[in-house]
Image (cartoon, rainbow, N blue to C red):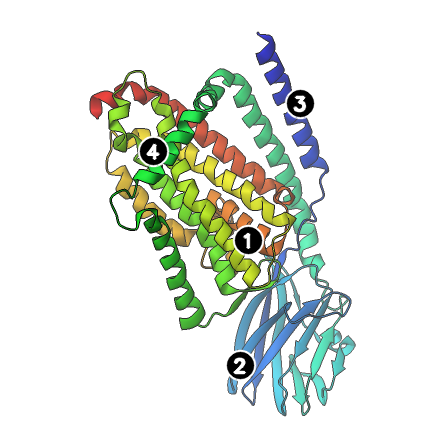
Amino acid sequence: MSKKRLLAVACVILFGILLNVFILTRSDGYAPIDVEVQLEITADHDGIVQLFYGNNGQFEESSSLVFEYEKSNKAQLFTGMVPSNATSIRLDFPDESSVAWVSLLRFARYDNEIMLTEDMLADAQTVRVDNVSWNNGKMDVSISGTDACVIFADEDFPLHEITDEHEWKINRIKKIAACVFVDLALFGVLLFFRKFVSLPIELYQNRKLIWKLSINDFKTRFAGSYLGIFWAFVQPVVTIVVYWLVFDKGLNVGSTLSRTGISVPFVLWLTAGLVPWFYFQEALMNGTNALIEYNYLVKKVVFKISILPIIKIMSALFVHIFFVVFVIILFACYGYYPDLYTLQVIYYSFCMFMLVLAICYTTCAVVIFFRDLSQIISIILQVGTWATPIMWQISIIHNRWLLLFFQLNPMYYVVNGYREALIEKAWFFDNVYMTIYFWGFVAAVFAIGALIFKRLKVHFADVL
C-alpha cells in the first residue's frame, strides 16, 4: 500500500471515529418537538379564540394559534401544533359579551396525551372572565369585557412529559442507527476506495475545462434570441409571482408559522422553498440530457465525457446564484437581514449540487439507451413539487410513518435547510441525523451512478 493511500485510509478511519463520538455524545435538545393541540368549542356568538403558548407566563403574538368559530349549537373542532417546550398556555376569548363551552382541550404526541380536566381548571388563572366553571365535562366561560383569558401553567399542561419518554427511546435508536450507517458507509469507501475516488479525481483534474465549457454553455443556450440570457430568469420569476398571487392575494394566506413558531410573510416562506427547487429541476433535466446534447464530443475518443454532466449542472448554477441573491434582498426588504446563519445557503446549495451530480451520472447514461427516461423524470419532478413541502408545511402530517416517508426525500433536507438558514436561524449540524442521512444517500447514489456510467460509456458512441 502506497503512503498516499495509507494516509487517506487513516484519515477516513479517524473521521469515522470522531463522527461516532460526536453522534453518541451530542445533546438531542436541538429544537422543541411539535405537539398537536385540539380545541373543541361551542358558542352563542361568532368570535375568535386565540391560543397562546409561551414560557414562564410570557406570551407573544407570533407564538399563538387563532381559531375563528361561528355561533352554533354543535361543537366545532380546531387543530394546530404547539412546541413541547411551552410552559404556559393561555386561551384568549373575544372582546364582547358571550358564553363559550370548551368541550375539549387536548395536547397529544402519538399515543401520549394530556386533556383538560376539572382539577386543571380549578388551578387555572382567569383574567377579566365573569365566570368559569366545569359542567358536564365542559368548561363554561362567560365574558362581558375585553382581553378576557384563562391561563394554565406548566403544572396543568406539562407538554414535555408527552414527548420525553418516547423521544428518549427514539433518540437512542437514532444514535445507534446513525453510527451503524456511518460505519458501513466508511467501510464501503475503504473497500472500494480506488473506484470511489477515480471519478472525483478525474473531475478535479479537468476543473479548468469544466469551468470554461460551463460558461460557454450558459452563453450559447439562448444565443440567437433578442433578449438572450434574460429568458433564463423569466420562468422562475413568473412562477414565483403566480404562486404569490394565488396563495397570498387570491387565497389570502398572508403569513405562515414556521416549524419553530415564527410568523413570516408567506411570500418569503414560499420563495425560500421554490428557489432551490428551481435549480434542482433545471439541473437534473439538463444533466440527464448532457450526453445527448453533446453527442459530437462523446464520439471523440480522446475527450473526457465524464465531465459533460457537471458542465450542464454548473451552467444552471449561474441562474441559481442570481436567485439566491434575489431571495436575500427580498428578505432584507421585509426586515429579515442577512447574518451568519444566512451563509448556510452556500452549504445547502453545495448539497443540492452534489445531489444532482450524483443522480445525473445514472440518468445521463441510462437515457441514451432508454429515451423515455426524460419524460419520466419530467413527470417525477412535477409530482416532486408537491411531494416536497414547498407550498405546504410538513407539520400538518401527524402520522409518523407518512412523516418519515416525506422526510426521506433528500430535497426535503435542502428546502428545509434554506428555510432554517433564512427564517428559523438554525445550524445544519444541529440536525445531525438528517445531515448524515442526506450525505449517505448522496454518496450511495454517486457510487452507483459512477459504476453505471463506467460500465455503459464504452457503448455510448455506438448508440448515439
Question: In screen coordinates, is 460 left or right of 421?
Answer: left
Image-quadrant location for residue 124: bottom right
Q: Residues within 10 Å of mark 2 (few under 14, many from 20)?
A: some
Residue 164 shows up from this direction: yes
Of circles 2 and 4, the one toward us is 4
Q: Say whether residue 305 is left or right of residue 76.
A: left
Distance, label 4 to label 1, CA atoms, is 29 Å
Tell me the SS state at disc 4. helix
Q: CA distance from mark 1 to mark 3?
A: 33 Å
Give the amino acid type for the residue marked by disc 3 in the picture.
Answer: Leu
Residue beneath label 1, please? Answer: 419
Q: Residue at x 61, y 62 (%)?
A: 262
Q: Answer with mark 4 or mark 1, whichever residue precedes in sequence.
A: 4
Distance between the alpha carbons at the discs numbered 1 and 2: 32 Å
Residue type of the residue flagged with mark 1: Arg
Query: In the rendered image, which residue does mark 2 sit on?
Result: 69
Q: Quadrant of the C terminus?
A: top left
Quick one: label 2 or label 4, which is nearer the N terminus? 2
Contact check, label 1 and label 3, Cβ < 8 Å: no
Tag 2: amino acid: Tyr
Q: Compared with residue 18, is residue 342 higher up or lower down, i.e. above or below? A: below
Residue 363's mark?
4
Q: Disc 3 to disc 2, how far (Cα)?
A: 60 Å
**Residue drawn at (42%, 67%), measured in percent from left and top?**
247
Q: Which residue is mark 3?
A: 14
* Residue furthest to the front: 226
For numbered disc 2, what is the local secondary structure?
A: strand
Q: Tag 3, which secondary structure? A: helix
Tell me the quarter of the picture where residue 26 sits.
top right
Q: Earlier in the sequence, mark 4 or mark 3?
A: 3
Q: Where residue 267 sits in the image (x, y, percent)?
A: 48, 63
Cα distance, mark 2 to mark 4?
52 Å
